[in-house]
Image (cartoon, grey):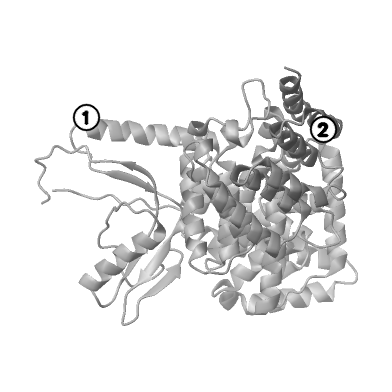
Amino acid sequence: MNDLGWIDPILGAARPRVMGALLRYFRTLDTAEEAFQEACLRALKSWPQNGPPRDAAAWLILVGRNAAMDQVRRQAKQTELPDEAVLSDLDDAEASLADRLDGEHYKDDILRLLFICCHPELPATQQIALALRIVCGLSVKQIAQAFLVGEAAMEQRITRAKARIGNAGVAFETPGAPERAERLAAVAAMIYLLFNEGYSSSSSREAEARKPLAEEAIWLGRLLLRLFPAEPEIMGLTALMLLQRARAKARFDGDGNVVLLEDQDRSLWSRPRIAEGLALIDKSMRHRRPGPYQIQAAIAALHARAQRAEDTDWAQIDLLYANLERLQPSPVVTLNRAVAVSKVKGPQAALEMLEPLGERLKGYFYFHGVKGALLEQLERPLEAREAFGRAIALATSPAEAAHIRQHLDRLSC
Amino acid sequence: MLYAILCYNSEEAIGAWSRDHHDETMARLYAVNDKLARQGRLGPVARLLPTTAATTLRKGREEMVIDGPFAETKEQLLGFYVIDCASLEEALDTAKELAKANPGTGSYEIRPVAEFHPSQLPESTPAS
């Protein structure tokens, strides 16, 4: 291989750690990004001749830091009033560089880098876009494509997000244990959001465009796990994403329409992803500290373990949803549980569970879809038709509407 | 003489490979595998899941189960087993059985296997 293709993955892998360290030195995202860019340029010049350094991240941190400091000094000479805060930070950074490169600092550096992307003032889509740009290193163009928006609009979104967090102020001291746990939870939520953004597509073409989002989310999940290997919820989150992503190839038919879980060709499921997801759940369960991600992953695991749809252990899934309802009460969780209950106790019991949800879920496509299917099973065609009619009105994609229409066609036979 | 070739690389870098790069690389590796198999020189080959899926059993007066891969730099890889287990618990039980048979220092890293190709060596191949 004589091209430079081998360098990119190394730079990509080192990025979170290098950006995390550079952000701690320079305290602003823009300076850290410029420093990282410069370090990458120098790597592309130096590595093909000298070979990659043993510790690529440490090399990039040093080179990026020096390059940015030169830049700051040059600017300081040209400017009448040098920014003293920045300069004193730099001196401080230089003095303790050696011990900062060692030890556990880099874990908090990366966590901080992810955490600033999760700033509560940022809307969810901006959090995700920022993390993709800053941590994963996707280009604005790539991010725009995945979000199905124009490049200029995405550029603006990211610039605005950066400006917002620039004013917000983030603690740069090493966080204490409770603060670290809080940061970890916020970052996990952002990663799962990113995953869902990539996963919740309603057509195969959309899914293809959004695929990088789901892949980056899994990459970030593994990154967090390497930093915090004994956190059962991070194991659960990563397992959940892997197990859902394992079904990617089976989720759409030849025409690009959604195929429901029970109708999917399970031979298309990715075995390595399932194996990794199951291994992570096994690990997390040893901790006996269940949480929402672990429970959802355990549910996904029961689907993954079933060779055929009819082998699914619905009783166990019902139990897991009951646990999830307790930990994280939500009408959508109850709706999902009702589906499991319909398989275990029949449609009547499930329908009774739906009754109290009607008010809160009346604008939710799946609610009416599930209700219609239950009524259909109970041979109450008129009510079923009405529920399906509502579902169609709420469908957000042709595929969703087409699926409901199949039900309606069956009812008319 | 049988030799084991142990594969090392940064899994973060491997994880950042594009699908195409991954597929091309695997195709080249499989071509080597095929050649070795035709020559009757290929033993079992395994690809392991990422270290994030690993658990480590630390031997000692009190055994300790640690999340994550083996991380000591003062100990060396001395050998490996491939065992079939229904769960991580069963794999850990087996590792504990080994630790009982060979107590003292050291660790067993338990890592799920992503891909396994059984031995294609002729049965008469001597172990040494």
Q: Chain of mark 1?
A: B
Q: Is residue B16 visible?
A: no
Q: Is residue A8 above or below residue B62?
A: above
For image coordinates 58% across by 51% down, the residue present is A317
| Residue corresponding to mark 2 | A383
Comparing marks 2 and 1, which lies closer to the viewer? 2
Mark 1: amino acid:
Arg
| Residue corresponding to mark 1 | B38
Image coordinates of residue A200 in percent, x first then y, are 71, 40
Mark 2: amino acid:
Glu
Left or right: residue A238 compared with residue B92: right
Q: Is residue A298 visible?
A: yes
Q: CA distance from mark 2 to mark 1?
A: 66 Å
Q: Chain of mark 2?
A: A
- Location of residue A379 by image quarter: top right
Image coordinates of residue A135 in percent, x first then y, are 68, 55
Number of callouts = 2
Left or right: residue A125 compared with residue A302: right
